[in-house]
């Protein structure tokens, strides 16, 4: 099973940090599914949403680096641009 949990139907507007959000279209509205070219500690990567938001400002997510899965969360900065924060730990 891959990293992607939700389908990515529609691309959003490219952000200033280079990331492009993709959304799943549901009856209740668009939901963030993944971020392409998202800034991560390991360079720009595709970051996939892995579950429901834990808090108002964090969405569980994961990306891949050298064949390993890096888990963390997606959050937004003061400019409302998404970015990925990796959990600390070993690779």
Image (tube, helix red, strand yellow):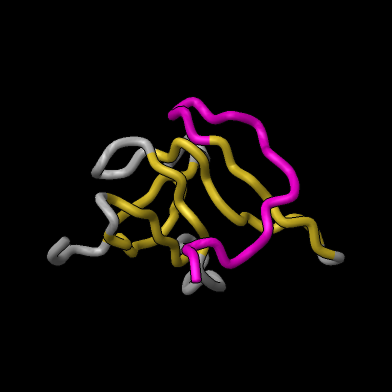
* Nearer to me, 44 or 55: 44
Q: In the rendered image of this protein, does residue 26 appear above or below residue 22? A: below
Q: Position of residue 34 (x, y in %)?
A: 55, 51
28 lies above or below 23: below
Percent across and percent down for residue 60 are 45, 67
Find the magenta span and give its range. Answer: 1-19
Q: Residue at x 16, y 61 (%)?
A: 91
In the depicted structure, whether residue 27 falls above or below residue 48: below
Left or right of 48? Residue 33 is: right
Nearest the viewer among 39 and 56 is 39
Q: Is residue 73 magenta?
A: no
Residue at image location 27% in from the left, 60% down from the top? 68
Q: Kindly indicate the quadrant of the structure image that contains residue 73.
A: bottom left
Single out the residue that lies furthest toward the left.
90
Residue at (74, 49) in percent of width and height: 9
Residue 71 left/right relative to 18 = left
Write the residue at 59% across / 29% down: 14
Residue 28 in the image: above or below residue 45: below
Judged by its main secondary structure, the magenta piece is: loop
Q: Could you tell me residue 71's position as x and y percent?
A: 33, 64
Task: Please provide percent x and percent y for residue 39.
Answer: 36, 38
Residue 12 among those drawn in magenta:
yes
Horizontal side of 72 relative to 23 (left or right) equals: left
Number of marks in picture: 0
């Amino acid at each position: 099973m891959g990293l992607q949990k939700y389908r990515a139907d529609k691309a959003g507007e490219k952000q200033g940090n280079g990331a492009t959000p993709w959304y799943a279209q549901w009856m209740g509205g668009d939901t963030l599914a993944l971020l392409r070219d998202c800034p991560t500690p390991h360079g720009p990567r595709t970051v996939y949403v892995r579950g429901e938001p834990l808090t108002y400002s964090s969405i569980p997510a994961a990306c891949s680096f050298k064949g390993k899965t890096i888990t963390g969360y997606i959050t937004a900065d003061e400019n409302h641009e998404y970015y990925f924060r990796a959990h600390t730990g070993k690779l």
